[in-house]
Image (cartoon, rainbow, N blue to C red):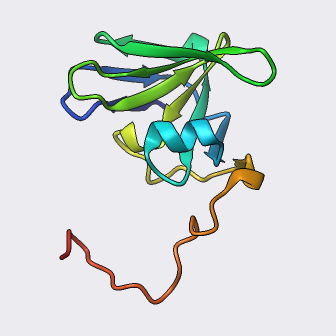
Amino acid sequence: MSLTGRCLCGAVSYTSDSEPLSVTYCHCDDCRRVTGSAFNVGVRVPASTFQLSGKTKGYESTNDQGITKNREFCPECGSQLFTRYPDMVFIKAGTLDNSEDLQPTREIWTEMAVSWSKIPDGLHKFSRGGT
């Protein structure tokens, strides 16, 4: 399986020649802030299989275990693309060219999940847009 994806404007693209090691819902504060949503969906691949085309900007931070990570985004359109660790990359699932076949395998930081993060039944549904 080959994974491909890109930012909104197309200035940055990537590929990984690896099956996803995991597909993870993350509810931590950092992921919520960086996505502007209730959670992030990250597709984990080995860093050795990840190739980037184009220039990204990044924000480096250290997690609770002392591991440095770099959240990278397109400097042109601002699309959050992936989080790079020393030996792995978590691709933002929404940036993949085809994410339909992915199956989430894990959910982490569930103690931080917001109560409204589950989509309830009975909402008005619009196949495209809506007012």
**Residue drawn at the location 61% of the way across and 31% of the way down:** 44
Q: 107 or 103: which is nearer to us?
A: 107
Q: Residue 89 is drawn in which quadrant?
A: top right
Q: Is residue 10 left or right of residue 3?
A: left
Q: Position of residue 63 (x, y in %)?
A: 71, 23
Q: Is residue 36 above or below residue 50?
A: below
Q: Residue 131 is drawn in which quadrant?
A: bottom left
Q: Is residue 120 visible?
A: yes
Q: Residue 127 is drawn in which quadrant?
A: bottom left
Q: Position of residue 99 (x, y in %)?
A: 44, 47
Q: Position of residue 21 (x, y in %)?
A: 67, 33
Q: Is residue 39 left or right of residue 130?
A: right
**Residue drawn at the location 44% of the way across and 15% of the way down:** 58
Q: Is residue 2 above or below residue 38?
A: above
Q: Is residue 1 visible?
A: no
**Residue drawn at the location 27% of the way across and 18% of the way down:** 75
